[in-house]
Amino acid sequence: MAVKRFSVSTDEETHAAIRAHAEAQGLDVSAYLMVAARLLMAQDDLVTARFADVDAAIAAAESGPEAPALPLNEEEAAAVDRFLDELVGPPKGQSVA
């Protein structure tokens, strides 16, 4: 496997803290940073997986009315219509019953 190199820049205080933490774990700085990166990537992957359904619903809702995120039954749709009527008023030419 080919090895790729990163160059990481930081202030002196953070540099010293990373080195101290790595040494406390018995690791060199490179290994310590790789462990930290892998842990953070695993956490990112877990969050992405857990919220995949929510993200899909948001994307569907943002795509427009032709693809509703959550289908509504008649009662729910009527409640939404009433709420919107109260919020912005009915469409022109219609009155609120």
Image (cartoon, rainbow, N blue to C red):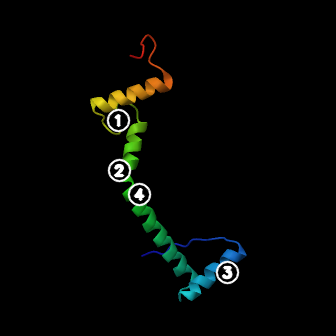
Q: Mark 4 points at which residue?
A: 48
Q: Which residue is drawn at 41% across and 57% down?
A: 48
Type of amino acid at the residue the image marks with label 3: Ala
Q: How crowded is mark 2: few (under 14 residues within 10 Å), some or many (20 or more)?
A: few
Identity of the residue furthest to the left in this view: 73
Closer to the observer: label 2 or label 3? 2
Q: Residue 68 carries which label?
A: 1
Q: Which of marks 2 and 3 is nearer the N terminus?
A: 3
Left or right: residue 36 versus residue 12 is left
Residue 84's image quarter?
A: top left
Q: How crowded is mark 4: few (under 14 residues within 10 Å), some or many (20 or more)?
A: few
Marks 4/2: CA distance? 10 Å
The quadrant in which the C terminus is found is top left
> Mark 1 Cα within 10 Å, few/some/many (few <14, many 20+)?
some
Q: Tell me which numbered mark, 4 or 2, is placed earlier along the sequence.
A: 4
Q: Do the residues labelled 4 and 1 touch (CB within 8 Å)?
A: no
The residue pinned by badge 3 equals: 16
Q: What element carries label 1?
A: loop
Q: Is the residue marked by circle 3 packed among few (<14), some (14-19), or many (20+) residues within 10 Å?
A: few
Q: Do the residues labelled 2 and 3 touch (CB within 8 Å)?
A: no
Dot 2 or dot 1, earlier in sequence:
2
